[in-house]
């Protein structure tokens, strides 16, 4: 089946790809088109993501393409103070994201970001952690974040979510078999992501009517907003995904 994309109206078959280890993924029919267009054209990205790659195969392609535009500070290069923060991150997150290593050149900024994201994602003031991870995955999917998606798919897997379900959340969350109230919460997060200027008090009232309390709604807004930042920060720096 051919897919029409927004690059000069070119059609291509999403199964016809050339894989180059350590290099970009090319479309065989149109070798001038690279997977980097996933950041520029949503329909291109969706066609590629829906080509039924496994999570591993997709992220390998992305890892081969996305190289850091600016250097990150590795553990070996870090000062004693920064290493302590890295060790804390590894304990709390279970790994050391390249996102935080990109901030390692400024210890105070790094500490501030670690505190913000760790508190927002791990402390259960309103929403349980797994729903916050689902929001992060959905938002990162909408924003076509080649860095954040593999990380949150990995985290959801560690939390016990079925891989096929987490992939649905990243590609087409409305097709996922979720609790109806969770689905409405995700729709709220999608609207905030794609049309923030259209947000109204009525959007909040609808969630309240479904049983979501103010602390849960606050968490949903916070996580959605944080990943608007994380998705763009990682894309702007060309961060390499943390997981294959």
Image: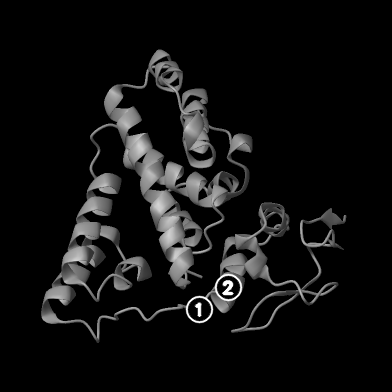
Q: Residues within 10 Å of mark 1 (few under 14, many from 20)?
A: some
Q: Is residue 70 visible?
A: yes
Q: Which x, y percent locates residue 141? A: 55, 50
Residue at x-position 29% and y-position 81%? 74
Dot 1 or dot 2: first in sequence order is 2
Please tell me which residue is depicted at 66% across the width and 53% down the height of the picture. Answer: 42
Residue corresponding to mark 1? 67
Q: Secondary structure at mark 2?
A: helix
Mark 1 falls on what kind of element? loop
- Residue 215's place in the image compared with 170, above or below, is above
The N terminus lies in quadrant = bottom right
Residue 35 appears left or right of 230: right
Q: Which residue appears at 28% of the width and 70% of the height? A: 103
Camera-nearest residue between 51 and 71:
71
Q: Is residue 239 visible?
A: no
Please tell me which residue lies in front, 199 or 155: 199
Q: Measured from the top left, where is residue 136 in percent x and y? A: 43, 47
Q: CA distance from mark 1 to mark 2?
A: 12 Å
Which residue matches tag 2? 60
Residue 186 placed where, x, y %? 49, 34
In the displayed structure, would residue 102 be above or below residue 166? below
Total marks shown come to 2
């Amino acid at each position: 089946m051919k897919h029409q994309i927004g690059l000069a109206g070119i059609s291509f078959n999403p199964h016809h790809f050339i894989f180059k280890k350590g290099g970009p993924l090319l479309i065989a029919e149109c070798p001038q088109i690279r997977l980097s267009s996933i950041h520029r054209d949503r329909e291109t990205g969706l066609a590629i993501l829906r080509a039924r790659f496994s999570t591993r195969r997709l992220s390998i392609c992305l890892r081969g393409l996305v190289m850091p535009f600016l250097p990150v500070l590795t553990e070996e290069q870090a000062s004693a103070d920064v290493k302590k923060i890295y060790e804390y991150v590894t304990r709390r997150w279970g790994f050391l994201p390249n996102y935080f290593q990109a901030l390692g050149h400024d210890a105070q900024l790094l500490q501030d970001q670690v505190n913000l994201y760790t508190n927002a994602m791990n402390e259960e003031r309103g929403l349980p952690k797994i729903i916050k991870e689902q929001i992060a995955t959905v938002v990162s999917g909408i924003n076509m974040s080649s860095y954040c998606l593999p990380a949150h798919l990995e985290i959801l897997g560690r939390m016990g979510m079925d891989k096929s379900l987490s992939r649905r959340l990243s590609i087409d969350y409305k097709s996922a078999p979720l609790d109806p109230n969770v689905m409405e919460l995700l729709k709220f997060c999608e609207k905030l992501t794609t049309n923030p200027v259209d947000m109204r008090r009525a959007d909040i009232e609808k969630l309240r009517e479904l049983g979501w309390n103010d602390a849960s709604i606050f968490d949903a807004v916070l996580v959605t907003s944080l990943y608007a930042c994380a998705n763009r920060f990682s894309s702007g720096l060309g961060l390499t995904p943390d997981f294959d």
